[in-house]
Amino acid sequence: MISPSTTFFRHEPRRNQLVNELWKAQQRDGHITEQTMEALSRDLDISLIEIQGVVSFYHFFHTRPTARHVIYLNNSIISKIKGYERIREALERETGSRFNTKDRTDTFALFETPCIGLSDQEPAALIDFHPFTNLNVMKVREIIAALKDGKEAADICDQPADHIRYLPPNNHTIFFRPYTAGEGLGRAMVLSPGEVIKIVKTSELSGRGGAFYPTWIKWDGCRKQKATPKYVVCNADEGEPGTFKDRVLLDREPGSVLEGMIIAGYAIGAKYGIIYLRAEYRWLLRKLEATIQQFYDQGLLGRAIRGNPDFDFDIRIQLGAGSYVCGEETALLESMEGKRGEPRTKWYFPVERGYLQKPTIINNVETFAAVARMMEMGINNYLNRGIPGSPGTKLISLSGDVRKPGIYEIEWGMTIAELLGHAGAEDPAYIQLSGPSGECVSMNQKHRRISMRDLLSTQDIRCGGSFMVLNRHRDIMTILLNFSEFFLKESCGICTPCRAGNYIIHKKLQKMANGLATQADVEEMRQWCHIMKETSRCGLGKTAYNTPLMAINEFSDYFSEKLEGAGNGMNLKFNMDEAISDYEKYKV
């Protein structure tokens, strides 16, 4: 059931309700019928073709009948190394279905999906959008048996652990210190909006979703816009594989995120806030709704907040429907407006023309939480954390071949080696920072510091929020192909360079994995990466193939064995185990 917080503000156009109406129809009927789309076309005054385009864009909308229970199994690289294949086989065996189909009784439908924000508890799946974690064959058997007996997924699902593994010593935590709703807002509202933005500038806070754009510049630019109304948008579309820090913040400290949004509204002169929550986190919706209601009850949301007759602010939640590219801010705006989540051409910044073509700031979950805490603890106290040029702390989602996967709140300046030591990394060899679109490093770079300083610095390295650690027994080509398949499927396809480039580079990687690639293929990959970086609309296309080229340079010995030096195509890879796998599986 969609929560009441998805009720739209009165001034929002009815067509913006399309995604929510599609969710309601799918929950009612199990899929979105042609009759539903025709009815919505009439009711919302949108062409049928446009509605069909929206439905086909999002992963979690189905136009064919599904089943009573819909299961989405995560297929990201962390899931793959933690037992994905055994869980996939167990699900098919216990349900009597195959992936991308349903069983004969219409009880179960099985699908794969990219990262669901549970990389610290893999293998993991969503059943009817409720989380099931740390799966093994026996647990799958028990879950499916319970569902067959009439139990609901909501009654037997797991409550994912927050796994907060490390906090800075000397009580230097920022995000997980004791929280009292309204303290940060109270201190902000004795200041002028300009003074609040000045504090944010002094903090050197930059976007915690990975772009690292200075927060104060967005806020100041939006405040200076004359058009109204203005909007504050929280980007909770945490879709980068290996990243789950926003999930933990929304589960553990949702009030700090709301409070940061309210402070932002006060600073820029906005009356409306919207949380864009990824569909994979739908199980967090009730908790967020309850926290929003508490804020209304305490006078922290609504009319005349804290007795200020000039400050009204409301927050609602917009549920996504499954699309990685909607993490890009303009694609997110399109999705909020009931459209396909395709990035906009950059004629205007969102602070000029964002949601409904009105001034809008879009910040990450962690960014808003940082603002609330900064105001509560005081700017001098905040600046006492971290290092010069990079103050404060950072949340890192850490998973993979480590003894303690989970959330690490580190002070900027910690080295890679120190972080891996805290996590109990097991023979680390390949480390992926900031998800597949980020950087890969080897242990040769273990002494580099994690900070916000110069992106090209040889000493420091930026991290948007995740470390995926893989040991020397993991095959690098398997990792890169998993990332490549992810980008191939997640590209919205609107840009020819991204659409074609993702396909071509994926084929080059497959060729390399089979021992047929030459140095000429590597050079062609470099050319396509340059084309995609220079001509793609959004960050997906511009960064999708950072990792393969970095890996080729960083792990040169490994890749030298993958290239076919003679260029005659005779170095074909043959895997005997794979060739006889079907026979071994079914032999008596």
Image (tube, rainbow, N blue to C red):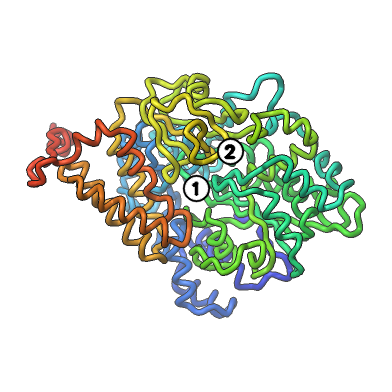
The kind of residue on which mark 2 rests is: Met
Write down the residue under mark 2: 452
Residue 422's spot in the image, x, y percent?
A: 52, 20
Q: Quadrant of residue 498?
A: bottom left
Residue 58's spot in the image, x, y percent?
A: 46, 60
Residue 380's spot in the image, x, y percent?
A: 78, 32
Residue pictured at 48% horizontal, 67% vertical: 54
User: Does residue 90 appear in the picture of this structure?
Assistant: no
* Residue 239's disc number: 1
- Separation (CA) of disc 2 from disc 1: 22 Å
Label 1 Cα neighbours within 10 Å, binned few <14 / some 14-19 / many ≥20: many
> Looking at the image, do the residues carrying marks 2 and 1 touch, with CB atoms under 8 Å apart?
no
**Which element is circle 1 on?**
loop
Q: Relative to residue 587, is residue 363 drawn left or right? A: right
Residue pictured at 32% horizontal, 61% vertical: 500
In depth, the one of 362 and 588 nearer the eye is 362
Q: Relative to residue 105, is residue 569 drawn left or right? A: left
Q: Which of marks 2 and 1 is in front?
A: 2
In depth, the one of 551 and 1 nearer the eye is 551
In depth, the one of 55 and 150 nearer the eye is 55
The kind of residue on which mark 1 rests is: Gly
Q: Measured along the vertical axis of the image, is residue 259 above or below residue 396?
A: below
Q: Measured along the vertical axis of the image, is residue 325 above or below residue 417?
A: below
Q: Measured along the vertical axis of the image, is residue 403 above or below residue 73?
A: above
